[in-house]
Amino acid sequence: MVIRFWRMTVLMLLLITTACSSYVTEMTPISPGTEVVEQAHPDTETKNELIVWTFYDTTESDRQFMILHPQIKVKTVRLKYEEIANAFIKAYGTRESPDVVFLDSSMTGQLNGLDILSNLRGQGNQVNQIAKKIPVNMLPQYSDVKLNKLIAMPIALPTAFTYYRADLLEENGFPADPDKLTEYLSTPQNWVDMAIKLKTKGIYLFQHYTDPIDVAAMSSSILNRKLEFAWDSQVFQDAIYVAREIRRNGLALRSTIWDPSGEQALRDGQLAMLYGGPWITDSLKSWAPDQAGSWRVSQLPLHLYGYRDGAMIGIAKDSQHKSEAGKYVQNVVSLTKSVDVSGQDSYLGGQDTLNMARSNAQYNKGIYPTPLDAELKALWDKNIQGIIESDQPIANQLALLKEQMEQVTKEERAIIKEAIQLKD
């Protein structure tokens, strides 16, 4: 009871107050044209100095920004990916708070109940024009929990695709054309049958048996807008069926592209399919440059549209340099920019993934991050392996999990519903 009361109290505070405390985390500053130094803390305010926090190297974009705006100095601090959201929450309201922060869209649920990010729709005409380029169905991913404010913008649209070795599929009698492959993989059994046949040639479509469930999760948040558990749909039932078949037939490589063995398997033609965002293109060019022209992209299996988490950018509400921060956001976000992707296109046999991402993004639906996502995802992860390993009906098991998840978060969901004025 004490833990329950504490959780509900914290949630209420998240939804009605802002964070304010000091932070302790590992930070590395990045200054264009200089060597990386180990520790940095902003000590003094400079009228036209922007403090930028990021989890990846922004040296080149910072340099370009300062060429366009030589009167604005950028002081960039690099934090660990897994620490940046909590560090920003803790630093807000102190002298250590940044003006601009790069985050991952998977972190939205940690932040959209907190009033610590500026509404980007109020950052001037240029930023507003960029905001209009975000497909309306994707706006909740970058909005506050009430859907009243745009608290962040994607650096680029993180539309998810199926990446596949067209040559290997064609050699083994499967569709290599993107549209035909999309249609073929629209049914779970075809996905399984392809994996079974290709395995006889030492070729895999999955890194782990949970890959189909990860694909399904790209199309839906764990709670829908009514704050009901959403991962019991037919899509997830189909994905779990495929996962069971992968496990039963040994169809997973059991190594990831982030491991040396998985990367080597990709180079050797043992891994013929990946599922994720446009960042995969550049990764493939780095991992397997000699496979240029062999890879293609198509829609996700099961006729799904979705996205993979990607970088987004926001402006701290307590920033004293919002005008300069707005210019920085305008410079970094690529939604309205014409980007030369000729190198990427040739690697993918001439496909224009930038335009494909923009076109497909309008169909993405069902993404509503909430402060409860992390708790619910942990509970999901704890149960999903048992469901995959079970022979019990999938729909029944998901119904039981739905009941458990909604019961565990009943009070918290009621608090959020009241905060967003959502009626049952």
Image (cartoon, rainbow, N blue to C red):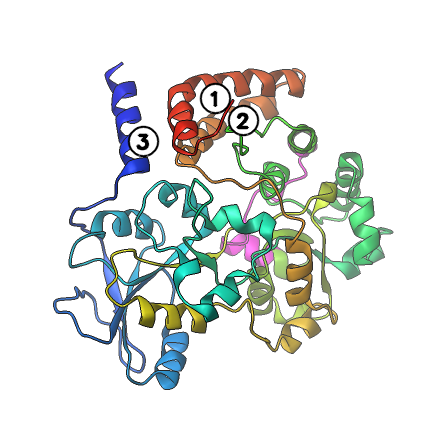
Displayed quadrant of residue 344: bottom right
Residue plotted at (24% across, 76% down): 48
Q: Which is more toward the observer, 40 or 70?
A: 70
Residue hosting label 3: 11
Q: Which of the 4 quarters of the picture holds residue 347?
A: bottom right
Q: Amino acid at mark 1?
A: Met
- Counting residues from the start of the chain, the first of labels 3 and 2 encountered is 3
Q: Nearer the viewer, mark 1 or mark 3?
A: 3
Q: Residues within 10 Å of mark 2 (few under 14, many from 20)?
A: many
Residue 162 in the image, given as x and y percentages of width and height = 68, 52
Q: Which residues are magenta?
A: 245-265
The mark tally for this picture is 3
First in residue order: circle 1 vs circle 2: 2
Q: Circle 3 sits in a helix, a strand or a loop, which is it?
A: helix
The three-letter amino acid code for the residue at tag 2 is: Phe
Q: Are circles 1 and 2 on residues that touch, CB within 8 Å?
A: yes
Query: Residue 347's mark?
Result: none
Residue 246 part of the magenta segment: yes
* Residue 78, image quadrant: bottom left
Q: Residue 257 versus residue 13: which sits nearer the camera?
A: 13
In the picture, the disc for residue 229 is 2
Residue at 42%, 19% (x, y): give it: 410
**Residue type pointed to by label 3:** Leu
Q: Which residue is mark 1?
A: 405
Q: Secondary structure at mark 2?
A: loop
